C-alpha cells in the first residue's frame, strides 16, 4: 500500500458514538459458536472522545479519565492499535491515546466496540496507512462483532455475527431517544447469549434458507423505508426476554419508560441493561427527561437525551 499520497499527521481527535438496537433478532447458532443475528443498529449522539498523538518509539500508550478501565490488554483500544500495527507490519508505529469515557460500560451501547472502531480509523489516518473503510471493517471484525458497524455507523442492517453490513441510506430524521441505565448494573454479553441458548435453542432456526428468509423480511420492513416517526420502528430485542426477568435494573427502566407520555416505542439495547424510549424529536425527549428527572434519580437511573446520527466514527481534526 502506498503511503506517499497521504500527509502524515501528528495528532488528531476522534469521536466514537454509541449505538442502540432498533431490532435484534436471534435466528440460530453458527458453526463458530456465535449466534446468527438479524439486526438494525443505529448510531446515537452519546459519544466517547479519543485524542491521539504520534510516537516515534513504536509504543502504544493508553490513558483515560476512567480509572476502572485497563490501559493495556483487555481494552479494545489497545488491542485495535496493536492489531493495526501488526497488520501494517511497521514496528516503529506508535501512538499516545487519551480516552474521555462518556458511554457507560457494559451497557449494551457498544462503547468498547466504538472505541476500537475509532482507534482503527484514527490511527489509519495518523499513521498514513490509507486502508479503505472496507479493509478497516474486516480488521474490526477480529476485535468484536459490533466493531465493523461502529466504523461507518448511521443506520445499518447487520447480519451474520453482526459484522455483515448493509448500510441504509437517507435515514436522516428528527427522531430521538431518552436512554436510561442503572449505573450500578452491567450485563455481560457472553452471559446474555449463553442464557439465550439455554432457554431458546430448541426454537432456533437451523437452515441457511430460513436465515435468509428472515433477512429478506427485515430488508422489506415498511418502517425501515425510511425511518420515520409517522411509521415508527416497532423495536424488537430477543435478548430483552432473557435479560429482563433476572435483571431488576432492566425491569425498573422498562416500567418507567413504558409509563412516560409521548413515547413511540420502548426497548432494551443490545444485551442491556440500557433501555430507551423512542420520541418523534429531541424536544419531546428532553421534556420527558426534565419532567421525570426526579423519578429517574429516585429510582437510581441515569438518563440521557440523544438524537439519532447518520454516521459512526468522526475524525475531528
Ligand atoms: O463479538 P463480541 O466480542 O462482541 O461477542 C461477545 C460474546 O457474545 C461472544 O463471545 C459470544 O459469546 C456472544 N455473541 C454471540 N453471537 C453473536 C455476537 C456475540 O453469541 N452474534
Image (cartoon, rainbow, N blue to C red):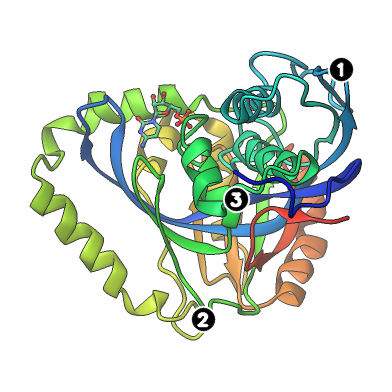
The label shown at residue 228 is: 2
The quadrant where residue 310 appears: bottom right
**Crowdedness near tag 2: few (<14), some (14–19) or many (≥20) residues, C-alpha within 10 Å:** some
Q: Tell me the residue at 46%/81% (across/down).
A: 226
Label 3 vs label 1, nearer the camera:
1
Q: Is mark 2 within 8 Å of ligand 1?
A: no
Q: Position of residue 10 (x, y in %)?
A: 91, 41
Q: Is mark 3 within 8 Å of ligand 1?
A: no
| Alpha-carbon span between mark 3 and mark 2 | 24 Å
Say whether residue 285 is left or right of residue 257.
Answer: right
Report the quarter where the N terminus lies.
Answer: top right
| Count of numbered labels shown in the rendering | 3
Q: Tell me the residue at 46%/70% (across/down).
A: 168
The label shown at residue 57 is: 1
Badge 3 is on which residue?
Answer: 151
Q: Please report contact status of discs 2 and 1: CB closer than 8 Å, yes or no.
A: no
| Alpha-carbon span between mark 3 and mark 1 | 27 Å
Amino acid at each position: 500500500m502506498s503511503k506517499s499520497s497521504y500527509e502524515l499527521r501528528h495528532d488528531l481527535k476522534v469521536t466514537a458514538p454509541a449505538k442502540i438496537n432498533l431490532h435484534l433478532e436471534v435466528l440460530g447458532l453458527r458453526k463458530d459458536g456465535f449466534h446468527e443475528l438479524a439486526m438494525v443498529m443505529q448510531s446515537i449522539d452519546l459519544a466517547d472522545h479519543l485524542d491521539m498523538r504520534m510516537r516515534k518509539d513504536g509504543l502504544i500508550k493508553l490513558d483515560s479519565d476512567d480509572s476502572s478501565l485497563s490501559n493495556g490488554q483487555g481494552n479494545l483500544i489497545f488491542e485495535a492499535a496493536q492489531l493495526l500495527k501488526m497488520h501494517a507490519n511497521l514496528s516503529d508505529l506508535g501512538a499516545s491515546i487519551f480516552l474521555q469515557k462518556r458511554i457507560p460500560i457494559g451497557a449494551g451501547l457498544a462503547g468498547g466496540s466504538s472505541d476500537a472502531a475509532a482507534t482503527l480509523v484514527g490511527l489509519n489516518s495518523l499513521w498514513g496507512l490509507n486502508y479503505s473503510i472496507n479493509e478497516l471493517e474486516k480488521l474490526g471484525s477480529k476485535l468484536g462483532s459490533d466493531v465493523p458497524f461502529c466504523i461507518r455507523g448511521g443506520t445499518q442492517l447487520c447480519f451474520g455475527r453482526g459484522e455483515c453490513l448493509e448500510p441504509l441510506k437517507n435515514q436522516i430524521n428528527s427522531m430521538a431517544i431518552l436512554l436510561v441505565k442503572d449505573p450500578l448494573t452491567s450485563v455481560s454479553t457472553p452471559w446474555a447469549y449463553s442464557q439465550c441458548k439455554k432457554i431458546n435453542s430448541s426454537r432456533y432456526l437451523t437452515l441457511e434458507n430460513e436465515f435468509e428468509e428472515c433477512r429478506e423480511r427485515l430488508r422489506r420492513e415498511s418502517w425501515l423505508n425510511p425511518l420515520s416517526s409517522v411509521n415508527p420502528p416497532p423495536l424488537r430485542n430477543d435478548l430483552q426476554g432473557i435479560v429482563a426477568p433476572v435483571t431488576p435494573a432492566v425491569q425498573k427502566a422498562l416500567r418507567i419508560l413504558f409509563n412516560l407520555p409521548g413515547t413511540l416505542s420502548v426497548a432494551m439495547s443490545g444485551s442491556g441493561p440500557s433501555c430507551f424510549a423512542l420520541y418523534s424529536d429531541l424536544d419531546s425527549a428532553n421534556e420527558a427527561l426534565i419532567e421525570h428527572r426526579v423519578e429517574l434519580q429516585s429510582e437510581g437511573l441515569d438518563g440521557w437525551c440523544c438524537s439519532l446520527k447518520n454516521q459512526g466514527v468522526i475524525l475531528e481534526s
